[in-house]
Amino acid sequence: MQSLRYIHFLVKRRTISSFHLNIANNIHYHSTMAAEEAVFLDYKKNTCQYKGYRHAAHAFIYCKMATSNEKMKHAVMMQLRFDGTLGFPGGFVDGGENLENGLNRELYEEIGLSQANHFNENDYFGSWYHEHISLMDHFYVKKLTENDFVKLEKRTLECHDWGGETMGIIRVPLQESSKNPKFYGLSQFFQHNFIGNAMHQLIQVLIEKNILPAVDVQDASVNRDQ
Ligand code: AMP
Ligand code: MN
């Protein structure tokens, strides 16, 4: 119910109307049990409350596309994972390893992230605590230049985990369609299987970083079966 809880939160903040709340209720059908049970929190302020879990860190990497690209205003990176689901690059943080160092190490292995684009504390977005699997998943968001983003995409073919953990780097289809419904590609995309609560992470960051208006994200989720 994480997605629903988030939508309620948006309604409270008047980001979206309660009309959209009603039609967006069906987002949660796409949530796995893991996603429904995950609790979103600011780990850096709540460290004492949660004990005896493993840490993972994943990254939402995106860029604004040149204005000449009218169809897709942003590119957002996700990957096809070894287990067949879609998710964000990243992975387990080793014991004793600092979160950002663990994330940068995983990102180097999975997508060949260079030192110049390393993540730091300022890129921290929030964490999701998955109680039933004792996992604290830390999430980071970083905006690259279009040039760096495209270079990174090309490097993934040569990195360590290619063909192992990383089966393909993809861009989330965010193009606006002249046809109805708008963001048809995104509504189709939501039908895939996502690891953990990755679909919810995608929705939350698209809205909070103003990559797409909240209403369009809701519409895409509502229209996904049409
Ligand atoms: P990885 O090494 O990328 O598979 O990630 C380490 C752990 O985090 C695994 O148990 C994954 O199942 C889990 N995981 C990966 N991505 C997510 C996600 N977006 N939300 C929740 N858990 C995830
Ligand atoms: Mn991984």
Image (cartoon, helix red, strand yellow):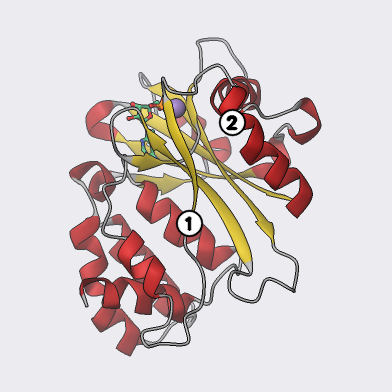
Q: Amino acid at mark 1?
A: Val
Q: Position of residue 137 (x, y in %)?
A: 43, 34
The disc, 1 or 2, on the residue closer to the chain's N-terminal end is 2
> Disc 2 marks which residue?
156
Q: From what the image shows, is residue 13 above or below residue 3?
A: below
- Considering the numbered disc 1 on the image, is that residue within a helix, a strand or a loop? loop
Local crowd at mark 1 within 10 Å, few (<14), some, or many (≥20)?
some
Percent of width and height locating residue 165: 41, 23
Residue 69 appears anywhere in the view = yes
**Horizontal side, residue 30 vs residue 178: left or right:** left
Q: Amino acid at mark 2?
A: Thr
Residue at x 74% of width, y 28% of height: 114
Q: Report the residue at 28% width, 52% height from top.
A: 192
How far apart are the alpha carbons under marks 1 and 2? 16 Å
Residue found farthest to the right: 116
Question: Of circles 1 and 2, which is in front?
Answer: 2
Residue toward you, 122 or 9: 122
Side of 129 relative to 63 (left or right)? left
